[in-house]
Amino acid sequence: MQQSAVPELAHTNTRPIHWLATATALAAVVAASAFLQPDEATAAQHGAEAKSAPAAVAPPDPAGVDFPVDCGPGKVLIQKKASGDLDGDGLPETVAVVRCDAGSGTPPSGVYVLTKGEGSSKARVVATLVDPKDRLSVEDFTLRDATITATLLGYSSPDVPSCCPDVNDSAKWQWKNGAFVRSTPPGAQSM
């Protein structure tokens, strides 16, 4: 082994004064960084390709909407709601499952798609997916990836009591060619 030609350096032995100097220097850097902050970041694009993104828009609220449901003296009850961009326009729609607030039995449900008009804050019904006149109740309602799915409970005949639906059907709706198209999801079974 060859000996080093450089003599031992005197400052390789640490003393408390070295630790104190290091801590003081570090504290000065941290204190200076608290006062010197970078500018706020912006995600602006420049040039001909720059497009303005639409501002975040709140989804339509079903409260206060005049649903096409005749409940007589009773009130309309919003059972479930979900929001998402159903038609790909970048603005959210809301799907609401509503029925009359009844004391007994299984009142029929309606499924409605709501949107807000340009510059309007009030929601309005733009599509009826399930009409209460069809005497169907909605169960297992979901909205995922612009697809609405639900289990529809109905009756095989007018003689079946309204408390006990005996027909089970699965339905799926998607926006295609300017309208909501209903189909049966794969693996759906009826009773």
Image (cartoon, helix red, strand yellow):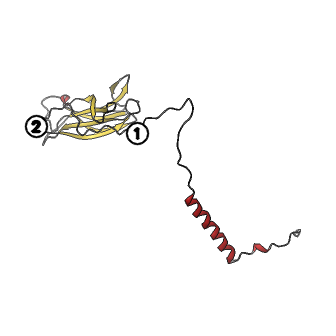
Single out the mark in the foreground, 1 or 2. Answer: 1
Farthest residue to the bottom: give it. Answer: 16
Q: Quadrant of residue 165?
A: top left
The image quadrant of residue 138 is top left
Callout 2 crowding tier (Cα within 10 Å): few <14, some 14–19, many ≥20: few
- Which mark, residue 56? 1
Q: Amino acid at mark 2?
A: Pro
Q: Quadrant of the N terminus?
A: bottom right
Q: Position of residue 107 (x, y in %)?
A: 17, 37
Q: Is residue 102 above or below residue 118?
A: below
On the rendered structure, is 93 left or right of 65? right
The residue at the point 23 percent across, 40 percent down is 78
Helix, strand or loop under label 1:
loop
Q: Quadrant of the C terminus?
A: top left
| Residue 91, x across and y down, in percent | 38, 34
Q: Is residue 25 left or right of residue 94?
A: right
Q: Is 4 placed left or right of 127 in the picture?
A: right
Residue 109 is left or right of residue 117, and the answer is left
Disc 1 and disc 2 in contact, CB within 8 angstroms: no
The part of the image, by quadrant, that contains residue 170 is top left
Q: Which residue is mark 2?
A: 73
Find the residue positioned furthest to the front.
Answer: 35
Would residue 189 be visible to someone looking at this image?
no
**Mark 1: amino acid:** Ala
Identity of the residue furthest to the left in this view: 73
Q: Look at the picture and state if 177 lies above or below 143.
A: above
Q: Position of residue 20 (x, y in %)?
A: 65, 74
